[in-house]
């Protein structure tokens, strides 16, 4: 057999690079504004996306994550999967984001430097249609602690806070408590549920420099879609609805209690507003309550917070403000530490009313529970739930 020459190796290498670049360019083109590619949810037949739902079908299937009612067709899709928990950034340059409006539950908390970040749970609300999500950003330990409640969810992120060793691992620049990547490895997530873009790449994840209609820095350009992530997990990792112990992920999942909306005459008028850090007004939040629809409409940094997928304003049926202990910066990299395991105060906004409450989480994998002043578990309205993780001494207006 003739040995390959240097020239033939170089030709093959160039061909590979060209083909890869062409593939990347094509995908970027398809997802770029004005090039015929859809920026709305993309129907992907065969794996949940692309269901031709009959609007007349009864909604008898309760979502275990937020209590919203869906069709039995959609239930059949989500029961074959585990939830997705996706890290989505909220820097000003990342807005408007894609996909948060389709999440079942959204957690918001500070990443560092006064900039908030989202951990979005996708499960029931995207069963019928593939949904573009992003910009996807890096992992943080307080979000890992929350994600752990969902019994090995598929955790999608782009890298994360880590040891950041200057000497090959002998010492770390970061505080051990905030080393998200090391914790992910310790918990066995690398083998069981971690969808780190660093180990997956294109085409499950892709960069789109033009999606926002303006040029932004590279860190604000990473996207994926719900079907791409679920499809990759099943095809290449054999991750479906089963947790590592072989049981359905939901078998050990503690459900919150849910209820229907209050009657119109029983609804209040409370609209919560707050900031995360003083004088970081780009991240101030207002949830304007609409009594007719019994929903809360979100404003961020003084402007309506819009989903790029369909130009709709983010809304919620329930807004929970969870007060936690904030510490930091805890290292020279300016990481913040938020204590998500333990107990503290909370405020629950639903039906235009405010409920003084408490939260408790006994362990990393334990479910965060919310109770009233008498210790009774709260019944939450069915539908999208947003949980705002605030420093415990912050003020709330309503």
Image: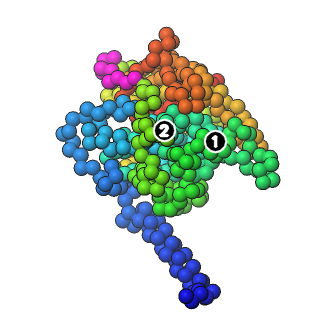
The image quarter containing residue 331 is top right
Q: Residue at x 30, y 21 (%)?
A: 264
Magenta region includes residue 375? no
For residue 220, say whether it is visible: no
Q: Indicate the position of residue 252 as horizontal and vertical percent values.
A: 45, 30
Element under label 1? helix
Q: Which residues are magenta?
A: 257-266
For the residues bearing labels 1 and 2, Cβ distance under 8 angstroms: no
Element under label 2? loop
Q: Residues within 10 Å of mark 1 (few under 14, many from 20)?
A: few
Q: Measured along the vertical axis of the image, is residue 70 above or below residue 41?
A: above
Q: Measured along the vertical axis of the image, is residue 19 above or below residue 315?
A: below
Q: Earlier in the sequence, mark 1 or mark 2?
A: 1
Is 236 in front, or is 392?
236
Circle 1 residue: 186
Q: Residue at x 53, y 57 (%)?
A: 200
Is 284 in front, or is 165?
165
Circle 2 residue: 245
Image quarter of the N terminus: bottom right
Left of 168 or right of it: where is 339?
Answer: left
């Amino acid at each position: 057999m003739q040995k390959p020459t240097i020239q033939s190796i170089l030709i093959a290498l160039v061909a590979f690079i060209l083909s890869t670049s062409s593939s990347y360019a094509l995908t970027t083109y398809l997802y770029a504004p004005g090039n015929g590619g859809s920026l709305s949810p993309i129907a992907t037949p065969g794996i949940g996306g692309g269901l031709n739902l009959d609007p007349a079908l009864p909604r008898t299937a309760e979502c275990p994550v937020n209590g919203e009612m869906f069709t039995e067709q959609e239930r059949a899709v989500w029961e074959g999967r585990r939830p997705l928990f996706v890290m989505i950034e909220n820097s000003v340059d990342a807005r408007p984001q894609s996909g948060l409006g389709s999440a079942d539950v959204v957690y918001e908390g500070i990443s560092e430097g006064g900039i908030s970040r989202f951990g979005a749970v996708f499960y029931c609300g995207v069963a019928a249609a593939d949904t573009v999500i992003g910009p996807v950003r890096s992992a943080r330990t307080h979000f890992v602690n929350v994600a752990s409640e969902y019994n090995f969810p598929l955790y999608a992120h782009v890298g994360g806070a880590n040891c950041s060793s200057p000497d090959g691992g002998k010492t770390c620049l970061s505080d051990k408590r905030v080393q998200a990547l090391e914790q992910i490895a310790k918990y066995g997530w690398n083998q069981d549920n971690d969808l780190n873009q660093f180990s997956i790449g294109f085409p499950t994840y892709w960069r789109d420099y033009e999606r926002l209609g303006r040029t932004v820095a590279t860190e604000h350009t990473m996207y994926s879609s719900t079907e791409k992530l679920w499809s990759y997990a099943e095809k290449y990792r054999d991750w479906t609805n089963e947790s590592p112990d072989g049981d359905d992920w939901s078998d050990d999942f503690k459900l919150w209690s849910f209820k229907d909306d209050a009657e119109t005459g029983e609804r209040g008028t409370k609209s919560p507003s707050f900031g995360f850090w003083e004088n970081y007004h780009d991240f101030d939040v207002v949830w304007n309550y609409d009594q007719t629809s019994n929903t809360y409409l979100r404003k961020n940094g003084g402007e309506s917070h819009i989903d790029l997928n369909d130009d709709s304003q983010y809304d919620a049926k329930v807004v929970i403000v969870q007060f936690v202990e904030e510490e930091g910066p805890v290292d020279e990299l300016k990481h913040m530490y938020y204590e998500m395991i333990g107990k503290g105060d909370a405020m629950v906004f639903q039906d235009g009313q405010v409920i003084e409450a408490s939260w408790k989480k006994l362990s990393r994998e334990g479910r965060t529970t919310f109770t009233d002043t008498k210790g009774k578990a709260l019944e939450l309205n069915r539908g999208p739930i947003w949980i705002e993780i605030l420093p415990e001494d912050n003020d709330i207006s309503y």
